[in-house]
């Protein structure tokens, strides 16, 4: 995991909320969008959620998986991210 990608991905309130949502169970883009709307996030387009999810995948915080009943889903890849600023290292769990 690259420190710059992780920090960039975590720099968005929307993406941090998506991580909280997906921490419960793998979800599709539409399921994440519906949950965000329930939580009163002003997200108008599915494409916005898709781009946020893909940025989280690119930063290695989420990963894609296929669930027969749902189709393509996203799930949490790591639960804890620790950044050592003195060494420029990132540790995940």
Image: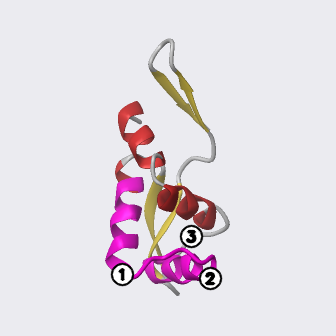
Residue drawn where x is 49% and y is 79% of the image: 33
Q: Is residue 52 above or below residue 49?
A: above
User: Where are the magenta residues, as a range?
Assistant: 28-56
What residue sits right under mark 3 in the picture?
A: 26
Say what secondary structure mark 3 lies in. Answer: loop
Residue drawn where x is 57% and y is 61% of the image: 17
Residue 91, percent from left and from top: 55, 29
Disc 3 to disc 2: CB gap under 8 Å: no
Q: Residues within 10 Å of mark 3 (few under 14, many from 20)?
A: many
Spatial distance from mark 2 to mark 1, Cα to Cα? 15 Å
Residue 10, percent from left and from top: 48, 47
What residue sits right under mark 2 in the picture?
A: 38
Find out whether residue 49 is within the magenta segment.
yes
Spatial distance from mark 1 to mark 3, Cα to Cα? 20 Å
Mark sitting on residue 45: 1
* Image quarter (top left, top right, bottom left or bottom right) of the N terminus: top left
Q: Quadrant of residue 45?
A: bottom left
Say what secondary structure mark 1 lies in. Answer: loop
Disc 1 versus disc 3: nearer the observer: 1
N-terminal of the two: label 2 or label 1?
Answer: 2
N-terminal of the two: label 3 or label 2?
Answer: 3
Find out whether residue 48 is within the magenta segment.
yes
Disc 3 versus disc 2: nearer the observer: 2
Residue drawn where x is 59% and y is 78% of the image: 40
Q: Is residue 14 above or below residue 93?
A: below
Spatial distance from mark 3 to mark 2, Cα to Cα? 17 Å
Residue drawn where x is 67% and y is 66% of the image: 24
Residue 19, percent from left and from top: 56, 59
Q: Residues within 10 Å of mark 1 (few under 14, many from 20)?
A: few
């Amino acid at each position: 995991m690259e420190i710059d990608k992780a920090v960039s991905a975590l720099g968005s309130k929307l993406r941090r909320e998506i991580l909280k949502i997906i921490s419960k169970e793998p979800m599709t883009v539409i399921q994440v969008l519906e949950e965000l709307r329930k939580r009163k996030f002003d997200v108008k387009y599915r494409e916005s959620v898709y781009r946020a999810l893909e940025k989280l995948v690119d930063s290695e915080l989420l990963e894609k998986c296929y669930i027969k009943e749902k189709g393509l889903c996203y799930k949490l890849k790591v639960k804890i991210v620790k950044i050592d600023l003195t060494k420029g290292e990132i540790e995940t769990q």
